[in-house]
């Protein structure tokens, strides 16, 4: 039953991404050229909501839907790895015209060229899994 709920939430999220034009290549293009606030508003809202949600989870000691305690592991502080990772992610996002979530939204909306991007991103994830022990973390 929970799987069906997750699928329905995913479909709803995909519809929201598509209708808000967060999956639009043109909106992403505008963002990287600093020509529109649209995507920055969406991303900023998501970051703000994420901060509030994490703080609520920590302060109210909320539990998961399975009743388990939610443990958030603190991250190591490092400027260089976030800078390098952000540059690689941003370049991939700019080249593909989509970040991982909207890729599947674009596929569902019938944008055929994304068929090249999805397997490429899966291969990149696989490649990272192979070399991650050699990378600074």
Image (cartoon, grey):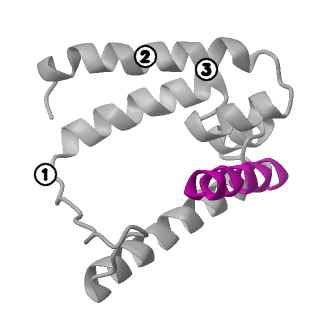
| Disc 1 from disc 2: Cα separation | 24 Å
Q: Position of residue 45 (x, y in %)?
A: 58, 67
Confirm or deny contact between disc 3 and disc 2 (CB under 8 A): no
Q: Is residue 108 above or below residue 4?
A: above
Secondary structure mostly taken by the magenta-highlighted segment of the chain: helix
Local packing at callout 1 (Cα closer than 10 Å; few below 14, some 14-19, many 20+) is few
- Return the disc, 3 or 2, that comes first in the chain's sequence: 3
Q: Quadrant of the N terminus?
A: bottom right
| Disc 1 from disc 3: Cα separation | 30 Å
Farthest bottom residue? 60
What residue sits right under mark 2 in the picture?
A: 124
Q: Is residue 125 above or below residue 30?
A: above
Q: Write the residue at 69% across / 39% down.
A: 28
**Position of 93 compared to 110: left or right?**
left
Q: Nearer the viewer, mark 1 or mark 3?
A: 3
Q: Position of residue 70 (x, y in %)?
A: 28, 68
- Residue 25 visible? The answer is no
Local packing at callout 3 (Cα closer than 10 Å; few below 14, some 14-19, many 20+) is some
Confirm or deny contact between disc 1 and disc 3 (CB under 8 A): no
**Position of 131 compared to 55: left or right?**
left
Q: What stretch of residues is rendered in magenta?
A: 1-20
Local packing at callout 2 (Cα closer than 10 Å; few below 14, some 14-19, many 20+) is few
How many numbered badges does the structure rendering display? 3
Confirm or deny contact between disc 1 and disc 2 (CB under 8 A): no
Where disc 3 sits, the SS reads helix
Where disc 1 sits, the SS reads loop
The quadrant in which residue 29 appears is: top right
Q: Tell me the number on the disc at residue 118.
A: 3
What residue sits right under mark 1 in the picture?
A: 76
Q: Position of residue 101 (x, y in %)?
A: 60, 40
């Amino acid at each position: 039953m929970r799987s069906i709920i997750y699928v329905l939430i995913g479909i709803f999220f995909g519809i929201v991404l598509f209708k808000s034009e967060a999956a639009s290549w043109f909106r992403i293009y505008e963002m990287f050229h600093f020509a529109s606030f649209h995507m920055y508003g969406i991303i900023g809202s998501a970051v703000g909501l994420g901060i509030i949600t994490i703080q609520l989870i920590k302060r109210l000691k909320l539990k998961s839907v399975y009743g388990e305690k939610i443990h958030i592991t603190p991250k190591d502080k490092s400027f260089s790895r976030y800078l390098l990772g952000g540059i690689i992610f941003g370049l991939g996002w700019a080249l593909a015209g989509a970040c991982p979530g909207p890729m599947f939204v674009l596929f569902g909306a019938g944008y055929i060229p994304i068929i090249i991007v999805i397997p490429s991103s899966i291969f990149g994830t696989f490649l990272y899994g192979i070399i991650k022990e050699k990378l600074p973390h």
